[in-house]
Image (cartoon, rainbow, N blue to C red):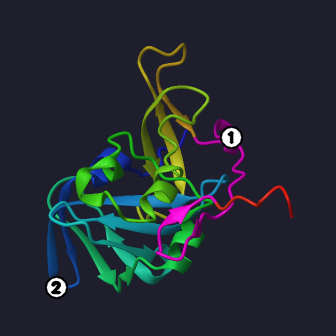
Amino acid sequence: MIAWPTVRASRIHHRSLWVNDRQYLGATLFPFFDGQGLVARVLLVDASSADLATFRVDQMQARIPAWGAMRLIGSLDPLSDETIDELAPLWHFDPWWLLKDPRFDGLWFIPVLKQTNCADAFEQRITDVSFSPTLTHVRRVSVAADQPETHSKRFRPEMLPARETEPMQKDATGKAGWVLDPFWE
């Protein structure tokens, strides 16, 4: 059996990160992946602010060492309406529920991003997700010790439920919410 190198989600949570020449202390990276485990974008959450940014994995070089600072070379994209629409049908793994932090209250897109958290969506209780070293795809999941099969397993698409999401619409004030069609029309 070949043991491919992986990067656990817990290893890219609350760590020092250098993006080009800028340092983030306590940064968390959330790879957003589809049902097949392919990562499209990665969300960067800075521990010291409510600013969020993303990057495409094919446009950024990532170096995630076992210890020390993580390094990214490339450009970050600010979170935009188009980016949120791109992330909405994808999954991310956040067992810490970092986006529930009060500093994010009132941001219209946070409910959309919370719905993409797959921490409780797996068929078994999962304690960690492992990605390829370049963060391009999910490789393995770690099953919780209280589950019948306690170990690391290769990720399979059937582990997650199918996504049936519609992007949330914003009202005139720019806040997200569900838009109801009047029944009389």
User: Residue beneath label 1, please?
Assistant: 161
Q: Is residue 53 magenta?
A: no
Within-10-Å neighbours for mark 1: few <14, some 14–19, many 20+ = few
Question: Most prominent secondary structure in the magenta stretch?
Answer: loop
Name the residue at 45% across, 60% down. 31
| Magenta range | 155-178
Closest to the observer, 164 or 152? 164
The quarter in which the N terminus is drawn is top right
The residue most toward the front is: 184
Name the element at disc 2: loop
Relative depth, front residue between 175 and 35: 175
Residue topped by disc 2: 21
For image coordinates 47% across by 57% down, the residue present is 113
Position in image of residue 49 (x %, y %): 19, 66
- Spatial CA distance of label 2 from label 1 is 40 Å
Please report the residue visible at 54 percent of the width from the left and 18 percent of the height from the top.
Answer: 149
Q: Position of residue 60 (x, y in %)?
A: 40, 80
Task: Say if 166 sits above or below 102 in the image.
Answer: below
Q: Which of marks 1 and 2 precedes in the sequence?
A: 2
**Residue 146 percent across, percent down from the top left:** 44, 14
Q: Quadrant of residue 134?
A: bottom left
Is residue 2 shown above or below 180? above
Q: Residues within 10 Å of mark 2 (few under 14, many from 20)?
A: few
Q: Who is closer to the viewer here, 77 or 33?
A: 77
- Residue 118: image x %, image y %? 52, 43
33 to the left or right of 42: right
